[in-house]
């Protein structure tokens, strides 16, 4: 120690230390005699990323931080200030930090190399007990941070996909509403023209019959683009041959109206009256078609919102409850639809209707499904295949996620559940997905296994049925 850090001053710092201040004076003296005072200036790297932490740091003053960028900007995942204990500790596994440990202000610590840990355990039992509690708290904090970060990354991905999925029906609603206002004006105009003709009751009945036939039949006509074009051409030819405006064909082609239907109308209404009647019918059909399109688009938006609510359990407390595994898988697949469509992946889901429910925190279990399914989507090539199935075996529900990607190389299979380990390109993977899956399943007393070879990778999740 330097003279400025004599034994007495170090013992005084230990006595004031938030975590270790309650230890006996004799243990403080032992620590003061065997530790090394170290100072880190602002911006100095204490432990580099990828290097095993080799010292315990009793922080007297200052601020040490680990920041990690997982795709949304760097943020703190853990920090130590005066009164905390950082670095490695007795009984810890000596994990490698996920990024540099940096002093964000001038920091003064009492440092102990790992070679002294056995002596600390023997000579300082009160301090050791405190360190064990701090180690457990740190592990919980790391786990909570990892889970939060992985959820935020997943939320970001899902939000981007959801925004894209909602954008299309939302644009359809806006466009449909704009054109509907124009169609209402056109319908009002043609209604006045039709009324001015003072048609006979049988003629009005013929017009109403055609309109009602359109309403009574299939609301949305399912025709291919080619079939629709042929149908519109046939209507256009008929309209032209009867001196009517051919532009009506586009609106009438969206309905079940046929040339035969128009012939029936022409037998009752002819000349200028036929043109007015057809204009009124076209305007009425356009309004109804636009209203149906708006309803379909709004229903799509509602269904997407319902899927997100169901997936996230946003209206439920974070407590265990009977969870429908099949619904969670279906919601996860639906939320990953943009990614599936982008790569042209074929997805088969085989979940029996009578699959028993499992006791779980629904939102956490869905995090498992979306991570496993997204990994499968990432693994397969364009046009690849993913099969998701579930069965009830004994007191377990088994869920399998299988893809036909290149497989997981044997040399890394034992590492894929490690935190921060990823085979994806920088910025495309946090290395937390499978680690989070493993930890969430452990919390649910479940387990996960991997079997992989080129062309077939299978994750099997075993959930207890309660």
Image: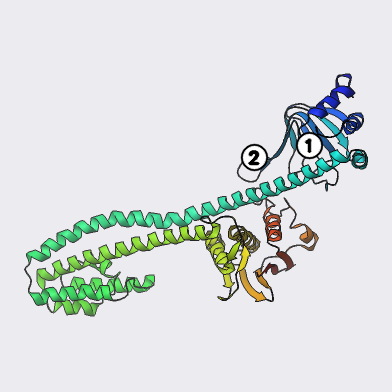
Say which element carries label 1.
strand
> How dense is the environment of label 2, judged by Cα within 10 Å: few (below 14), some, or many (20 and up)?
few
Mark 2 element type: strand
Q: Which residue is disc 2 drawn over?
A: 74
Q: Nearer the viewer, residue 27 or 185?
A: 27
Q: Quadrant of residue 51?
A: top right
Q: Answer few, some or many: residues within 10 Å of disc 1's Cα (few below 14, many 20 plus, some between 14 and 19).
A: many
Say whether residue 244 is left or right of residue 59: left
User: In the picture shown, does residue 289 fall above or below 8?
Assistant: below
- For mark 1, what is the residue? 85
Q: Quadrant of residue 399?
A: bottom right
Residue drawn at (30%, 62%) of the image: 291
Q: Nearer the viewer, residue 168 or 103?
A: 103
The tag on residue 4 is none
User: Is residue 346 found left or right of 114 in the rendered image?
Assistant: left
Q: Nearer the viewer, residue 152 or 204?
A: 152
Separation of residues labelled 2 and 1 (CA atoms): 23 Å
* Total numbered labels: 2
Give residue 105's position: percent from left, percent from top: 72, 27
């Amino acid at each position: 120690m330097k003279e400025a850090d004599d034994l007495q001053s170090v013992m005084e710092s230990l006595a004031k230390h938030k975590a270790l201040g309650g230890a006996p004076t004799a243990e403080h003296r032992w620590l003061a005699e065997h530790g090394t005072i170290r100072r880190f200036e602002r911006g100095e790297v204490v432990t580099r990323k990828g290097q095993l932490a080799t010292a315990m740091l009793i922080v007297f003053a200052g601020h040490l931080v680990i920041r990690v960028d997982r795709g949304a900007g760097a943020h703190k995942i853990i920090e130590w200030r005066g009164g905390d204990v950082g670095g490695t500790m007795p009984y810890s596994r000596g994990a490698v930090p996920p990024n540099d440990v940096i002093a964000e202000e001038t920091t003064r610590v009492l440092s102990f190399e790992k070679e002294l840990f056995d002596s600390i355990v023997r000579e300082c039992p009160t301090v050791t007990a405190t360190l064990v509690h701090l180690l457990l708290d740190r592990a919980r904090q790391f786990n909570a941070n990892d889970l939060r970060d992985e959820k935020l990354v997943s939320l970001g991905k899902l939000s981007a996909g959801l925004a894209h999925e909602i954008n299309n029906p939302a644009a359809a609603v806006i466009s449909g509403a704009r054109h509907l206002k124009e169609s209402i004006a056109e319908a009002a105009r043609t209604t006045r023209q039709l009324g001015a003709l003072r048609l006979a009751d049988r003629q009005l009945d013929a017009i109403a019959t055609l309109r009602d036939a359109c309403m009574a039949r299939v609301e949305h006509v399912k025709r291919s683009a080619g079939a629709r074009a042929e149908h519109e051409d046939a209507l256009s030819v008929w309209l032209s041959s009867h001196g009517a405006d051919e532009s009506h064909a586009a609106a009438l082609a969206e309905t079940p109206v046929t040339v035969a239907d128009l012939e029936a109308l022409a037998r009752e209404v002819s000349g200028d009256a036929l043109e007015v009647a057809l204009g009124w019918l076209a305007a009425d059909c356009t309004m109804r078609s636009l209203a149906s399109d708006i309803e379909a688009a709004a229903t799509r938006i509602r269904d997407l919102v319902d899927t997100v609510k169901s997936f996230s359990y946003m209206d439920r407390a974070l407590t265990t409850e009977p969870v429908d595994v099949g619904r969670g898988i279906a919601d996860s697949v639906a939320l990953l639809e943009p990614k599936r469509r982008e790569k042209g992946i074929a997805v088969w889901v085989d979940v029996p209707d009578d699959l028993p429910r499992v006791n779980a925190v629904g939102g956490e279990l869905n995090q498992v499904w979306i991570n496993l399914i997204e990994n499968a989507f990432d693994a397969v090539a364009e046009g690849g295949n993913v099969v998701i199935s579930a069965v009830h075996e004994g007191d377990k529900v088994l869920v399998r996620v299988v893809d036909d990607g290149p497989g997981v190389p044997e040399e890394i299979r034992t590492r894929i559940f490690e935190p921060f380990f990823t085979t994806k390109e920088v910025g495309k993977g946090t290395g937390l997905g499978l680690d989070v899956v493993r930890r969430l399943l452990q919390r649910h007393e479940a387990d996960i296994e991997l079997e992989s070879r080129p062309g077939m990778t299978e994750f099997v999740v075993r959930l207890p049925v309660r």
